[in-house]
Image (tube, helix red, strand yellow):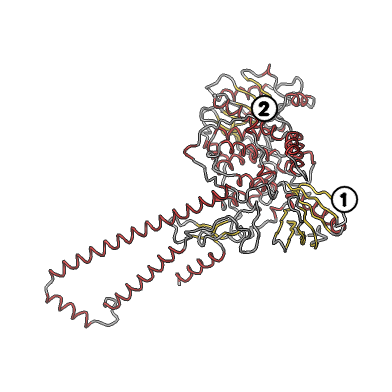
Amino acid sequence: MEFIKTPKVENVRMLDRYSKTPSQGTLYLTATHLIFVDPDAKKETWILHMHIASLEKLPLTTTGSPLLIRCKTFLSVTFVIPKERDCHDIYTTLQQLSQPSNVEDLYCFQYTASFEDIPKTSGWNMFDLRSEYKRMGVPNDHWCLTMLNKDYELCDTYPKFLYVPSTASTTVLMGSSRFRSKGRLPVLSYLHHNKASISRCSQPLSGFSARCLEDEQMLNHVLRTNPNSSFMYVVDTRPKINAIANRAAGKGYENEAFYENIKFHFLGVENIHVMRNSLIKIVETCEQKNPTMNSFLSGLESSGWLKHIKSILETSWFIAQALEDNISVVVHCSDGWDRTAQVCSLASLLLDPYYRTIEGFQALIEKDWLGFGHKFSERCGHVQSDNKEVSPVFTQLLDATWQLMQQFPLTFQFNERFLLTIHDHVMSCQYGTFIGNCEKDRLDLRLSERTFSLWGYMSYHLSEYINPVYVEDETPGILIPNLCPQNIRFWRGMYCRFENGVHPREPLGDLLLATCDHSRSLEDHIKYLTKKISSVKSLILNVTEKKKSKHDDTNLLDNKYLYEKNARLESSDDNHPLKTDHLEKDKSSTDTKGAQEVMSSLDSVALDWKTLRNISECGCSAPFDHFSRKYHCRKCGDVFCIRCIDKQVILPGHLTLRAVPVCRPCFEKIQGSSVEAVE
């Protein structure tokens, strides 16, 4: 690209605060990645440009010019570049490549699936908004689909399909939309089985005294959709002082005197600016050069991060409790796409076991974040914009979900790696799923035609995201979290995952996954063997019965008939297919072929898998570290890195005939055997 002035710099040192000796190698700058290669340690460090959060040139040293790179994935690395000019070139180039000025320059529009045969259409049709509402039992007598937003004219940041009270007229809907910030009127987000609902919207444009009869009627219509309660809650997720301050700008909150049978609650989740500063302090705490217990704990306390996670969970739990008690809730914050998205999705997660599955959690994100709008471009810094708009709103959703997973380890189908993968790819822009701020943006950019979907990629790697201790039958309907302070934990796996020396050598989750994968492979093989044994038994039984029947028939035949039959066979052509030696030859050939097939099937599944422990590098010489997962080949049982086990094939020894991961040599061997069998 024209931005890259210095594509390669040699004799660069990479500083690691957990290692006494820095790595030395070559730094490569490509169109998409910054790559550091240390040939002595056989180590490669890849940094995607879109993952870079900030760049800082540190003061010159005697060994060179240090460049500090902080990533959105919480990787922090310093490169000491020998020449100051080279350092400046890389610094300016990375500034341009890490934050494009135009959305069309994002990575997803250039990305092509490198070594996996994933079609571009895969994943784009996995979620349908109307199907998700149908699963909840909508439309029904109380809720209906309105097409007022089919051209995004009612609210351009909402989806085209909106579900509203059946009794609400077009006049009421349009009047309420005009009275709400950004036109985001109250619409259905989640319907519980007892008819209580979560509706979401933005703050009213009430100022100090303004009112809107249509908006008051709209909330009354929402109240009447639940015949089991005579009142409902309006939850304003902001601290009350913030809502009062917004009145000066002509916005604010609902006047209780104008809304009947509604109880108002302010629940105090802080705004995006407080959350951004809190995360900055967390990063600084994790980057301490010589951390002590006191300095780490005081840094964690002063950041307020865990307090914010707790307040988000408490607000979500308040909403979930209300629905369980048959009370409907309308939720809003300022514009209804940050805190509102957080608490609506987390409340749904607490209430509905479906959202705790892999498919359900993806549907939840599609509905409450992608469908109803969230400013991913600004909050995640995808393109050049005001830094004050950047905020870890979506990161907090994943953190709060992880907190619930720690309290209820058996009730979530997905594991920590699932959350980390989503987080990293929201930031990477490698897939088009999270590009743009709303449904309309994604349609205008034609993302489903031009880019790959993250859900498509993840569907090809589902085995990596399965929680091995998930028990579907024991999952309760509603989760009742214990939100006392000592139960809110610091998520080391997210914020400190790249730090050497602070993680176990083999993560317990990876060991459990490997054990489960091995067990499934063996169970599948046992089913295949059981079927083969049954076939052999029935074959032996049939042969025995035929011999017995033939013996009985022979005793009854006349000798003259046998003599004449033998004479006819002897006088027939030698090549006649019924001649005995041909029959025996064909039978022998068939038996040999069948035996070869059985032997091939038996050898196609690895009975013993190599242990993950004490394996420091892959066969390709790529080293294994604490954040790169090790993979087993299902055929040979050896351990490989992700790049060496990129093939999937059906093993003859598995009854289910499901494609499973194998290494490249085994893949070629199986493919070669298949060709020989066809020939």
Residue picked out by circle 2: 176
Rounded to the nearest whole Å, what is the CA distance between mark 2 and mark 1? 56 Å
**In this orientation, which residue lies closer to the viewer: 348 or 285?**
285
Q: Position of residue 228 (x, y in %)?
A: 52, 22
- Residue 210 in view (yes/no): yes
Q: Position of residue 274 (x, y in %)?
A: 76, 34
In the rendered structure, the answer to whether residue 520 lies left or right of residue 48 reads left
Mark 2 surroundings: few (<14), some (14-19) or many (≥20) residues within 10 A: many
**In this orientation, which residue lies closer to the viewer: 563 or 450?**
563
Mark 1 surroundings: few (<14), some (14-19) or many (≥20) residues within 10 A: few
Residue picked out by circle 1: 59
- Kind of residue indicated by mark 2: Ser
Number of labelled discs? 2
Q: Position of residue 467 (x, y in %)?
A: 54, 45
Quadrant for the C terminus in the image: bottom left
Q: Toward which corner of the image does residue 156 lie, by quadrant? A: top right
Q: Tag on residue 26? A: none
Of marks 2 and 1, which one's residue comes earlier in the chain?
1
524 w.r.t. 127: above or below: below
186 w.r.t. 566: above or below: above
Quadrant for the N terminus in the image: bottom right
31 w.r.t. 402: above or below: below
The residue drawn where x is 48% and y is 70% is 675
Q: Secondary structure at mark 1?
A: loop
Residues at circles 2 and 1 in contact by the CB criterion of under 8 Å: no
**In this orientation, which residue lies closer to the viewer: 537 or 647?**
537
- Kind of residue indicated by mark 1: Pro
